[in-house]
Image: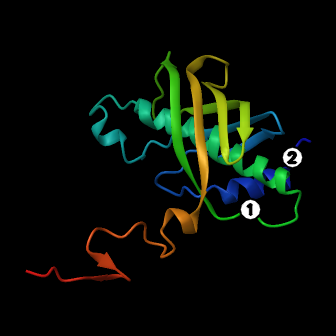
Amino acid sequence: MEADPVLRGRILEMVPQRHPFRFIGEILELDEEHIVGVYRFRSDEYFYAGHFPGLPVTPGVILIETMAQTGVVAFGLYLSLLRQKGEKAVEDPVTLFTLAEQVEFSGVVRPGELVRVAGRKVYFRGNQLKVDCVMTRPNGDEVCSGTLAGKGVPRDKFTGGNGRGHAPPGEENGALQEESL
């Protein structure tokens, strides 16, 4: 079932990443087998100042993250909604990145460039999604590709139920316990 523009917008809003670490601007296509999204790298992205000074290039790890936000996070949220058939809301998940294999870079992305990310489902089992992703320029030139996977974890399980992550050693109930000497 092809997602209509309203549902695509809803999925986009559900993606938890926010500025300055959100690299998905719009979802163009979305169905049970694939997703296509776009993102324009702004010239003021925080990482350009240091990568590389005077010759700004988008870091490869950011390109992988861009593919993951579209191909794993947004796509996984949609597939989870379909699985639940509207019976209940999707839990507030945290998608943990679990795999990046056969990633290849064939171009660079500079400030101001628009990229297109296409992801095709390899499998969606339980709370795990594996996707073949390709990033291209609008003219079709490939920038990078690879197989990515992630696992959705309910936020309360990820945070240990307190919304702050797992407590560091020696900390219980939000208060640091004094060590006995």
In the displayed image of the protein, which residue is found farthest to the front?
Answer: 181
- 168 vs 87, left or right, is left
In the image, is 15 to the left or to the right of 102?
right
Relative to 7, is 161 above or below?
below
Q: CA distance from mark 2 to mark 1?
A: 16 Å
Q: Could you say which is closer to the camera, residue 179 or residue 73?
A: 179
- Amino acid type, callout 2: Ala
**Residue corresponding to mark 1:** 90
Report helix, strand or loop for mark 2. Answer: loop
Q: Position of residue 110 (x, y in %)?
A: 45, 30
Question: Can residue 92 be seen by looking at this rendering?
Answer: yes
Residue at 59% over, 36% down: 149
Q: Which mark is residue 71?
A: none
Q: Is residue 40 at all visible to an observer of this figure? A: no
- Horizontal relation, residue 69 to residue 84: left or right: left
Asked if 49 appears above or below 172 in the picture, the reply is above
Is residue 70 left or right of 80 when viewed as pictured? Answer: left
